[in-house]
Amino acid sequence: MKNRIILFGLTLITSIAFFSCENQMKFDKVAWNKSDDPAFLPPARKRMLKDLLTNHKLMGLKYSQLINTLGEPNYIDDSLLGYGIIEDYGSDIDPVYTKTLQFTISKDSIITSFKVSEWKK
C-alpha cells in the first residue's frame, strides 16, 4: 500500500511538471525571424522569449547591435521599437491579444530599457 502511494505521488509530480512546462527554446536569430507567412509573426518567438531575456545582454546595446541580434523590428516609433511575440486573432479580423517586446532607445541610439507588454481586447 505504501509503495502505491509513493508511486501515485511520483506519477502526479511528474505529470504536473510535464504539463506545466512550455516547450521553451534557446534564442536563435534565424528561427526568431523565420515565418512561413509574412502576414504572421514568427511562431518560435514565444518559445524563445524567456531565454532571450534571461541569457542575452540587451540593456546598453547600440541600435545596430540590437538589429544585428534580433533583426528588423516590427515597428519603430520615436524612441520605441518593438518585436511582436504573439498576435491572437481568435475569430475576429482584428487582434484580440498581443504580446510585444518593446525597447526604449536614447538619442545616442542606446537601449535604455525594455519590457514585455501585453494587450487584451
Image (cartoon, rainbow, N blue to C red):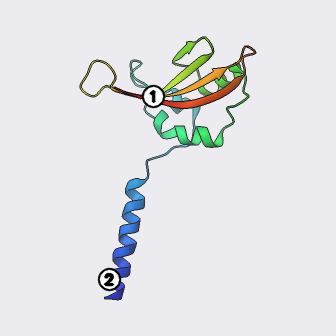
Residue at the bottom extreme of this rendering = 1
Above or below residue 47? Residue 113 is: above
Choose between 98 and 51: the one closer to the eye. Answer: 98
Q: Residue at x 25, y 22 (%)?
A: 92
Q: Name the foreground residue: 116 vs 88.
A: 116
Secondary structure found at label 1: loop
Mark 1 and mark 2 residues within 8 Å of each other at the beta carbon: no
Image position, residue 20 (x, y; %): 40, 54
Q: Is residue 86 visible?
A: no
Above or below 4: residue 115: above
Report whether residue 17 is seen: yes
In the rendered image, the quadrant that contains the N terminus is: bottom left
**Which residue is found at the position 64% from the left and 43% from the top?**
55
How far across and down, in percent of the image, does residue 58 sit?
Answer: 67, 32
Q: Position of residue 95 (x, y in %)?
A: 34, 22
Q: Amino acid at mark 2?
A: Arg
State the residue in front, 78 or 56.
78
Q: Which mark is residue 42?
A: 1
Q: Position of residue 52 (x, y in %)?
A: 59, 38
Residue at the disc numbered 2: 4
Please rate how many residues cluster around mark 2, counting C-alpha atoms within 10 Å: few if below 14, some from 14 to 19, many from 20.
Answer: few
